[in-house]
Structures are given as structure tokens and as C-alpha cells.
Amino acid sequence: ARQEGDFVGQHDVLGRMRDQYNGAPLIGQATHELHQRGFGTGIKTRSWFVQIKEAGFREQLHTNRDAFLLAAAQGLFLTILIFHRHRTLFANRFLGILLLGYTLVLFHLFLDELDFIEYHPALPFIALGLVFLVAPLHYLYAKYLSQNHHQLLPKDIKHVVPFVLYYMVMIWLFTFHQSSILRITQSDHSVRIHGFFLAFNWIVIVYSTFYIILTLQLLSTCSTQIRQYQA
């Protein structure tokens, strides 16, 4: 009887151990399911957050497009208004061309937001040339407004020579070397195109600084003459 009791006791202990062993996977499975649910919730939360960010980014892009298009439309309206109503003052003609240049730059930025430039890589080179027109126009407007000239002086034609030369070079390059230029511009890691834009930026900085100095000297001279006249 004692042996039978011991056998029953051992069997009971082994049964409990087996139940505990079988219960462990259930606990592990429950923990795994809980983890999966929590992880799934985290994925959903992060996915929702990414969607919100993407929606905000798209909204920002639409805002930029609308802003550039509105500014370009206002610039075009002012250009037409100046040439239609205020062209009598000769200096305003420089102002009208200046506003038209800024309008083209804004419209170029609008096309860039639409990814239109990606399919027409020659457009950035066209827009870059406007820099050589905008800088001297500021100076010419100040000069003709302060000195009240009624026609373009022959000596001032030299100020638009860099602008004309730039487009002559661009026409030559895109006529005879278009494939090479487009192949370079479409390479994201091209050292040559990076060097070109770096050199061009420095040229623009020096060129614009030169005309800023000319304009400031002109305004300083006019200010001195006005003070002498009032005295």
C-alpha cells in the first residue's frame, strides 16, 4: 500500500510538472500575442504619423506652388501696368523689364515645384541668364531716374553685353553639344556640374556686388548734389 501510495504520489507530481510544462508555452504564447498586438499598434501609430507628415509635406508643396504662381501673376500685372500707364518716364521702362525678370524667375520656381524642370533640364540654364540682366537694371533704373534721361545712352549698352553673351554661349552649347550637357546635368554625382554651378555662383556674387557698389556710388553722388542744391 505504501508503494502504491508512493507511485500515486509520484504520478501526481509528474502530472503537475507536466501541466506546468504544458502551461509554459501558453504563457509564452500569450506574451507573444500581447507583444505582437503592442508592436502592431506601434506600427499603426508610426504609419499614421508618417501619413500625417507626408500629408503636411504635400500641403507645403501646394502652398509653395500657389505662392510662386500668385507672386508671378502679380509681377506680370505690375509689368503690364507700368508699360501701359507709366512708360512716359523713361526710367520706368527699366523698372518694367526688371519686374518682368523677377516674374520669370518666380514662374521658373513654380515649374520647379511641379517637377517640370526634371523633364526639361535646359530650362535652368535659361533662367540663370536673367541674373546678368537683373543686376544692371537696378543700376540703370537708379541712374535714369536720378538724371532724368529720356532715351538710352549709347554708352549704357555695355551693361547688357554679359546678358547677351550668356545666351549666345547657351545657344551655341545646346546647338552643338546638347547631348553632352544633358548627360552631365542628369548625373546626380557629377563633379563637373557641381564645379560649374560653384563657379557660376561666384561669378554672380562678384557681378552683383559690382553693380551694388555702382548703384550706391550713384546714389551717394545724387545725395550730395541735392544737399548742395538745397544749401
Image (tube, helix red, strand yellow):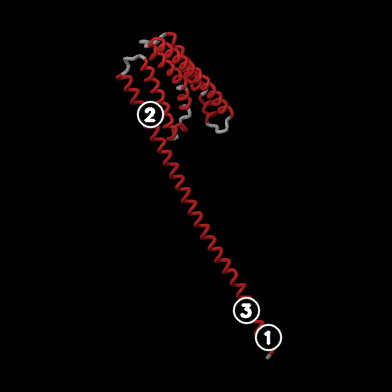
Of residues 176 and 26, the one nearer the viewer is 26
Instruction: Name the image quarter holding residue 15.
Output: bottom right
Which residue is labeled 2 in the image? 72
Q: Secondary structure at mark 1?
A: helix
Task: Find residue 35 and report its horizontal and vertical position in percent.
Answer: 54, 61
Count neighbours of disc 2 (C-alpha within 10 A) and say few if under 14, some if 14 to 19, many if 20 or more: many
Q: Amino acid at mark 3?
A: Gly
Count neighbours of disc 3 (C-alpha within 10 A) and say few if under 14, some if 14 to 19, many if 20 or more: few
Task: Find residue 3 and report its horizontal and vertical position in percent.
Answer: 69, 88
Q: Earlier in the sequence, mark 1 or mark 3?
A: 1
Which residue is labeled 3 in the image? 15
Q: Earlier in the sequence, mark 2 or mark 3?
A: 3
Q: Earlier in the sequence, mark 2 or mark 1?
A: 1
Q: Residue furthest front?
A: 231
Q: Amino acid at mark 1?
A: Asp
**For the residues bearing labels 2 and 3, Cβ distance under 8 angstroms:** no
Which residue is labeled 1 in the image? 6
Labels 2, 3: front one: 2
Marks 2 and 3, how far apart in space? 85 Å
Q: Residue furthest bottom?
A: 1
Q: Is residue 3 left or right of residue 218?
A: right
Residue 168: in sight, yes or no? no
> What is the quadrant of the N terminus in the image?
bottom right
Image point (59%, 68%), residue name: 25
Residue 229: in sight, yes or no? yes
Instruction: Name the image quarter holding residue 194.
Output: top right
Marks 1 and 3, how far apart in space? 14 Å
> What is the quadrant of the C terminus in the image?
top left
Q: Secondary structure at mark 3?
A: helix
Task: Find residue 86 and report its horizontal and vertical position in percent.
Answer: 31, 18
Image point (41%, 41%), residue name: 59
**For the residues bearing labels 1 and 3, Cβ distance under 8 angstroms:** no
